[in-house]
Image (cartoon, helix red, strand yellow):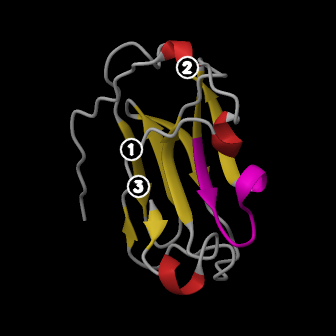
C-alpha cells in the first residue's frame, strides 16, 4: 500500500505498507515491511517470518492499523507489530489515506535482477480483499 500523497512528497516520505512479500530466492519466508522516510529500502521496519507452507493453498494476510500501531497477521497469527514511540512524520506517515497495489513483481532490487525465466508461466491468484473500518 502507498500513501495517497505520493505524487506530492514522493517515496519513501509518503510511506509504504507491505502486508505480504514473498520472493522466490527464499521460498520458505514471508516478509512484512513498513517503509518510511526514516527507514526504507533494505533498512525498512521489517519482519522476516519462516513460513514453509506459504505455497500450499490460500492464506489470509491481514493487518490492523490504528493511530498507535500496525500489527500484521498470517492465518490469524500475529507475526509483527510496529509501535513507535515517536510519531513524527518521518517515522509515522500512516495518518493519511493509503491505496492498495496488488502485484507480482519479477526481478528488481528486492527479488534480484537475475531471473530464471524457466519458471514461467506462473499464476498469481487472489481470492478476495476486504477492508474494515
Front-lying residue, 133 or 107: 107
Mark 2 secondary-structure assignment? helix
Q: Residues within 10 Å of mark 2 (few under 14, many from 20)?
A: few
Dot 1 and dot 2 residues touching (CB under 8 Å): no
Q: Disc 2 versus disc 3: distance between alpha carbons?
A: 36 Å
Q: Which mark is residue 64?
A: 3
The relative height of residue 21 versus residue 66 in the rendered view (above or below) is above
**Residue reaching furthest to the front:** 117
Going 47% across and 20% down the picture, which residue do you hit? Answer: 54
Q: Residues within 10 Å of mark 3 (few under 14, many from 20)?
A: few
Dot 3 and dot 1 residues touching (CB under 8 Å): yes
Q: Nearer the viewer, mark 2 or mark 3?
A: 2
Going 39% across and 20% down the picture, which residue do you hit? Answer: 122
Per the rendered image, the range of residues in magenta is 32-43
Going 38% across and 75% down the picture, which residue do you hit? Answer: 97
Q: Quadrant of the C terminus?
A: bottom left
Q: Position of residue 98 (x, y in %)?
A: 40, 69
Q: Position of residue 35 (x, y in %)?
A: 63, 61
Mark 3 secondary-structure assignment? strand
Q: Disc 1 versus disc 2: distance between alpha carbons?
A: 31 Å
Q: Is residue 47 visible?
A: no
Q: Position of residue 96 (x, y in %)?
A: 43, 79
Going 63% across and 26% down the picture, which residue do you hit? Answer: 115
Residue that badge 2 annotates: 117
Asked if residue 7 is among those painted magenta in the image, a careful observer would answer no
Dot 2 and dot 3 residues touching (CB under 8 Å): no
Q: Quadrant of the N terminus?
A: bottom left
The relative height of residue 9 versus residue 3 in the rendered view (above or below) is below
Q: Nearer the viewer, mark 1 or mark 2?
A: 2
Residue that badge 1 annotates: 62
Amino acid at each position: 500500500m502507498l500513501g495517497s500523497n505520493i505524487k506530492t512528497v514522493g517515496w519513501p516520505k509518503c510511506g509504504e505498507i507491505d502486508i505480504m512479500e514473498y520472493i522466490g530466492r527464499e521460498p520458505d519466508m514471508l516478509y512484512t515491511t513498513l517503509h518510511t522516510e526514516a527507514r526504507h529500502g533494505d533498512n525498512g521496519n521489517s519482519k522476516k517470518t519462516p513460513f514453509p507452507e506459504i505455497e500450499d493453498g490460500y492464506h489470509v494476510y491481514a493487518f490492523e492499523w490504528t493511530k498507535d500501531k500496525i500489527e500484521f497477521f498470517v492465518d490469524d497469527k500475529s507475526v509483527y507489530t510496529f509501535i513507535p514511540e515517536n510519531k513524527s512524520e518521518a517515522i509515522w506517515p500512516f495518518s493519511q489515506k493509503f491505496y492498495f497495489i496488488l502485484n507480482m513483481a519479477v526481478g528488481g532490487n528486492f527479488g534480484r535482477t537475475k531471473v530464471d525465466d524457466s519458471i514461467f508461466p506462473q499464476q498469481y491468484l487472489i481470492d478476495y480483499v476486504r477492508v474494515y473500518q
